[in-house]
Every structure is written in structure tokens, then in C-alpha cells.
Image (cartoon, coloured by chain):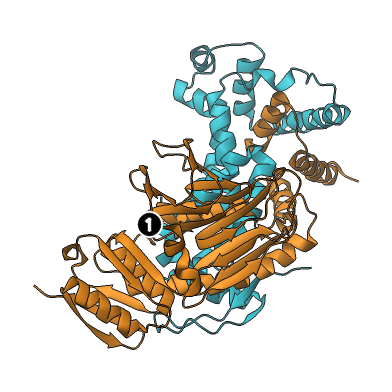
């Protein structure tokens, strides 16, 4: 079943007529109208979009970052930025798809920060997961296979840098000297976040010009 | 099955399992590393996330409402801090009340039909400008809801507590049940009673949140996280009025005549030492009009005034005009323009 949103027939902007409302299920075209009303300064449209989508947004983000308070904070920021950029929201073709992209951006961003904060994250990739939970043990085994695949598929130099750092425990400086590349390049290879940042910056540019 | 196809299936499975489970810190970090490391499998990751997004289903609960209130005050579009209350503010407030009702009706449908980790099913009542509404909750607690107010309550109260969420103004006549304290939650304060008559006023566009106790005993907790008074608890006696200032976080408790103050229930509006803006906001709500006042800062001082239920808006404005001796007004449709005289 795919129900997007109910609609409430929107009064023309500032004509003061706010008393007749029709509640129906919303089609994609109508959703667009809704966004348009919000972009034109109809705060009520904003509130209704919030009430409809925020619980789903929180649940989705929390599924990945496993911190419901943080998920709620992130959702607040998303809606705040939406409001701040409301004039440009008219460009959004599908609100639901837009929120999905933004949520994905936020999730990757969260992971990035988590990983950047932890310098030894790559050392622990091969440490076995100690757990009594059978489901988790099974999960960890399958995840490890995928991690190995990811490493196998890395570009040649990135993989070498990665393995020198992880297996041989060399410092970034030592790796730079051995491979004859700059320390900065090594750092870029090591920083796991980078790929994701590249991936999402495009999106951020597209949407908010940041 | 080729390797690519198999790994795509695994990716979906891994992401899905993770999404629905709670694993240890070390597993979570490995998952995060795998997610951000770009490779050929990115499309598969995207698709899996997209599927989970499509499936994600959650309904509105009190927390959602609190988040919305918090967001609104962060944005500040409902803070009538200017001396000229904008037409738009009024426009959306009345609209929001009606709109909310519709949205919540649909939301309750979703809550009702989705798998219920939200707990109870919630009922949402919004009362538009120009009306008041009387309501009897499942535990026989009686609630009178004033104009421009949203009240959310569970269809059935659970064990051990009876909580409702209020944005706006309502009087509560709570049925005694010592095993299940009754709590009115607002953005800034929580008011808990065992069995008692009290009022809570928490309009999002007002500077203050207040509660008046008529009978019995209530406990008030300041819940606004950033306030200096956050976490403070007050035990109130009858005929006390607690006022929480949203800007400064200050709390004051004064003695008043509760039965007089609470008589808006019968259509009366009574102000004892309120500022001019508060009175205008109450008139806006009662008569469903927009009142625009130039140079409201000139209308300083505290006002003591009573408007009876049968008085029209014109009567009220005339009374207020005579009392303050400081303004004239004109009318354009639903909008009243006040101009202070020198």
C-alpha cells in the first residue's frame, strides 16, 4: 500500500480564508502542491509535513545510528534547514525522496564523524566480535565477508596504504616515504570518511548550496 | 548465481538485519566502516536503504508534538516579539488548529493500523479559534479546552500513570486515582495531580506558561531543558498561580482567586494584572479575529479587567479603550487595527 500524504486544500496565500478543509489521501502531484505552498511561506504546510514525516525520519535514522536522541536531533536539524531554505523548496520534486536523500546524507555524516574520531577503527575490523548473541555472531561473520570484499575491491594504492597501516602498523609518514607519495595523500587514503563525504557533498551542493 | 548478484543479496540482508537489531559497540563500528567505504556495492547499499525507508512506518506521539513545539520556538516564527503582531501568525495559528486536527486524525489511523511499538493509541483534539470544547476522558476526568488549543491523550490510560500533552489552555477536573497520577505535559512544565481541579495555560505564542490550582494539590516540574530552573519542582496549594517565563526561565507563584480566573470556561475573560498583549491575544482567540496594534510598547502597565461571556468584541474593545484611554480602533473584515493615541 502506498499512501503518501493526505491533503488539506490550501487557501490561497494570505487570502485569510482558512476555514474550509478537505481531507483526502494525497497523490504525488498534490504533494508537490503542498511543498509549493510551504515554499510560498505557508507555515502550516510545513507543520503538517513535519507531523507526517518526522516520526518516520526519526525511526529510519535511528535504525542506522542506534541513538534515538541523536536521531531526533538530526531530524530537527533537517527540518530547520528545510525551513531556512523554504524559498528554494519549490525545486523539490518529491518530498519523500528528498527526505530519504537527506536522511542518508545525515547517516553517512554521522558514521564519518564516528570513524574519524576513532583512529584505530581499521585495526579492529579483524578483531573477532565477542558476543553471546548467536544472531550477532552470525551477523558479524557475514559482515566480515563483505568487509573483505570491500578491501579486495579497493583501488590498488588505497589497498596498499590500508594494508601497510593495518597489517604492518606503519605510521602515515612511513607509508608516505615507502610509497613516495605525500603524507596528505596517505591520510586521504586512510580516512574512511572521504568516500562518503565525496558522495554526499554533491547532494549538499545541489540542495542547499553549502 | 554469480558473485555480484549474491553479494547484492547479502548486502540487503546485512543492512536489514542491522537495522532491526541491537548489536554491540564493536559490531556497530565495523558496520559503520563498511557502510562508508565506497566500492562497487554502493548501489546495492542505496537500494537496501531505500527499501527500509519505504517500509519505515511510525506514528505521531507526544514526543513528535514536543519536537514540533521545540522546532517552532527555535525557528521563532510564532514568537510575536514585534510590536506588530503579523497577520501571518494569526493566519497559521487558527489554520494550524484545524489542520492539526485533520493531520492527526489521519495519523491516528496510521498509529492504529501499524504495529504498535508506540504503546497506546492517541487521540488528538484541536479546538479552533472562537470555540471552546468540553471533553470527558476514559477515567472520567473532565477537561474544558479553550480556543486555539491542541490536547493529545491516550484512548486508554496505561498502568501507573495518566499523561496528556497540551499546547494551549485547558481546565482539568481530575478523577481521583492515587495509583495513577495525572500529568499534563507541556513544552516547558509538567503539572501532576492526584485528583484535583486546575488549569494549565501553555500557548506556544505566549511569553509565559502558567497553571492555576482551584482544589486539591498539584506538583509542577520545570521540564524546559535549557532553563536555569530546569528540573525544579513546586508543590501548589489552592488559589495559587504559577507563572513560568519562557525567555528568562524564572518562576513566580502568586495568590489569586482561582474560581474567577478559571471562569473562561463559562465564557468570561478575567485578567488580574496582565499586560496589554496578553489581553489582545486572549481576545483574538475568543473572537477569532486578528488584532494588530501599532506601537504596543506604549501600552505598558498591568490591566485588571473582566469581560463577560455575553459581551461582543466591540463591547470588549470599548471597555478596554475606556480603561486604558490610550487607543482608537478600526475594523477591516476579521482584522482590528488599534492605534495608540498620544
Figure check: A96 above or below A148? below
Figure check: B215 above or below B339? above
Relative placement, left or right, of B247 versus A197 is: left
> In which quadrant is the C terminus of chain B drawn?
bottom left
Q: Nearer the viewer, residue A154 or B272?
A: B272
Relative placement, left or right, of A205 versus A166 is: left
Figure check: B71 above or below A22? above
What residue lies at 55% left-to-right and 64% top-to-bottom?
B150
Residue indicated by mark 1: B76
Q: Nearer the viewer, residue A120 or B195?
A: B195
Q: Nearer the viewer, residue B64 or A93?
A: B64
- Label 1 resides on the chain identified as B
What residue lies at 56% left-to-right and 49% top-to-bottom?
B216
Which chain is depicted cyan?
Answer: A
Is residue A209 visible in the rendered image? The answer is no
Please rate how many residues cluster around mark 1, counting C-alpha atoms within 10 Å: few if below 14, some from 14 to 19, many from 20. few
Mark 1 element type: loop
What residue lies at 78% left-to-right and 59% top-to-bottom?
B114
Counting from the top left corner in percent of width and height, residue A22 is at 61, 82
Extreme-left residue of the structure: B342
Counting from the top left corner in percent of width and height, residue B9 is at 83, 45
Counting from the top left corner in percent of width and height, residue A108 is at 59, 41
Counting from the top left corner in percent of width and height, residue B90 is at 39, 72
Residue A43's quadrant in the figure?
bottom left
Is residue A3 visible in the rendered image? The answer is yes
Q: Nearer the viewer, residue B11 or A55?
A: A55
What residue lies at 37% left-to-right and 67% top-to-bottom?
B270
Which chain is depicted orange?
Answer: B
Amino acid at each position: 500500500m502506498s499512501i503518501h500524504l493526505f491533503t488539506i486544500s490550501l487557501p490561497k496565500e494570505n487570502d485569510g480564508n482558512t476555514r474550509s478543509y478537505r481531507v483526502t489521501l494525497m497523490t504525488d502531484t498534490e504533494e508537490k502542491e503542498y511543498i509549493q505552498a510551504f515554499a510560498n511561506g505557508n507555515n502550516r504546510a510545513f507543520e503538517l509535513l513535519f507531523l507526517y514525516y518526522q516520526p518516520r525520519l526519526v525511526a529510519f535514522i535511528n535504525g542506522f545510528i542506534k541513538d534515538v536522541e541523536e536521531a531526533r536531533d538530526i531530524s530537527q536539524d533537517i527540518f530547520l534547514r528545510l525551513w531556512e531554505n523554504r524559498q528554494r523548496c519549490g525545486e523539490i520534486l518529491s518530498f519523500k525522496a528528498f527526505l530519504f536523500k537527506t536522511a542518508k546524507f545525515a547517516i553517512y555524516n554521522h558514521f564519518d564523524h564516528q570513524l574519524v574520531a576513532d583512529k584505530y577503527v581499521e585495526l579492529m575490523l579483524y578483531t573477532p566480535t565477542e558476543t553471546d548473541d548467536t544472531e550477532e555472531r552470525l551477523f558479524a561473520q557475514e559482515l566480515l565477508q563483505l568487509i573483505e570484499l570491500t578491501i579486495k575491491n579497493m583501488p590498488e594504492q588505497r589497498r596498499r596504504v590500508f594494508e601497510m597501516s593495518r597489517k604492518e602498523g606503519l605510521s602515515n609518514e612511513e607509508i608516505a616515504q615507502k610509497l613516495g607519495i605525500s603524507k596528505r595523500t596517505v591520510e586521504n587514503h586512510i580516512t574512511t570518511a572521504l568516500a562518503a563525504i565525496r558522495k554526499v557533498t554533491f547532494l549538499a551542493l545541489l540542495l542547499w548550496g553549502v | 548465481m554469480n558473485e555480484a548478484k549474491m553479494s547484492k543479496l547479502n548486502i540487503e540482508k546485512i543492512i536489514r538485519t542491522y537495522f532491526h537489531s541491537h548489536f554491540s559497540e564493536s559490531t556497530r563500528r565495523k558496520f559503520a566502516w563498511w557502510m562508508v567505504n565506497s566500492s562497487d556495492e554502493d548501489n546495492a547499499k542505496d537500494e537496501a536503504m531505500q527499501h527500509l525507508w519505504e517500509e519505515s512506518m511510525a506514528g505521531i506521539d507526544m514526543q513528535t508534538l514536543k519536537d514540533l513545539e521545540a522546532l517552532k520556538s527555535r525557528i521563532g516564527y510564532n514568537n510575536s516579539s514585534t510590536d506588530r503582531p503579523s497577520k501571518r501568525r494569526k493566519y497559521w495559528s487558527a489554520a494550524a488548529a484545524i489542520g492539526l486536527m485533520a493531520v492527526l486524525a489521519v495519523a491516528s489511523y496510521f498509529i492504529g493500523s501499524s504495529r504498535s511499538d508506540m504503546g497506546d493509541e492517541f487521540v488528538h483534539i484541536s479546538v479552533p479559534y472562537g470555540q471552546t470544547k468540553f471533553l470527558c476522558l476514559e477515567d472520567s476526568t473532565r477537561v474544558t479546552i479553550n480556543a486555539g488549543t491542541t490536547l493529545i491523550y491516550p484512548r486508554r490510560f496505561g498502568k501507573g500513570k495518566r499523561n496528556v500533552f497540551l499546547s494551549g489552555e485547558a481546565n482539568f477536573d481530575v478523577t481521583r486515582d492515587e495509583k495513577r497520577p495525572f500529568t499534563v505535559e507541556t513544552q516547558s512544565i509538567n503539572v501532576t495531580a492526584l485528583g484535583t481541579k486546575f488549569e494549565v495555560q501553555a500557548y506556544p505564542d505566549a511569553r509565559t506558561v502558567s497553571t492555576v490550582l482551584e482544589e486539591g494539590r498539584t506538583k509542577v516540574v520545570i521540564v524546559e531543558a535549557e532553563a536555569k530552573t530546569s528540573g525544579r519542582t513546586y508543590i501548589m496549594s489552592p488559589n495559587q498561580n504559577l507563572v513560568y517565563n519562557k525567555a528568562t526561565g524564572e518562576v513566580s507563584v502568586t495568590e489569586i482567586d482561582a474560581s474567577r480566573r478559571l471562569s473562561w470556561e463559562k465564557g468570561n475573560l478575567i485578567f488580574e494584572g496582565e499586560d496589554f498583549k496578553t489581553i489582545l491575544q486572549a481576545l483574538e482567540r475568543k473572537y477569532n479575529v486578528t488584532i494588530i496594534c501599532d506601537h504596543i510598547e506604549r501600552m505598558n502597565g498591568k490591566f485588571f479587567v473582566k469581560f463577560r461571556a455575553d459581551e461582543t468584541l466591540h463591547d470588549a474593545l470599548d471597555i478596554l479603550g475606556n480603561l486604558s484611554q490610550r487607543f482608537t480602533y478600526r475594523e477591516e473584515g476579521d482584522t482590528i487595527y488599534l492605534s495608540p493615541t498620544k
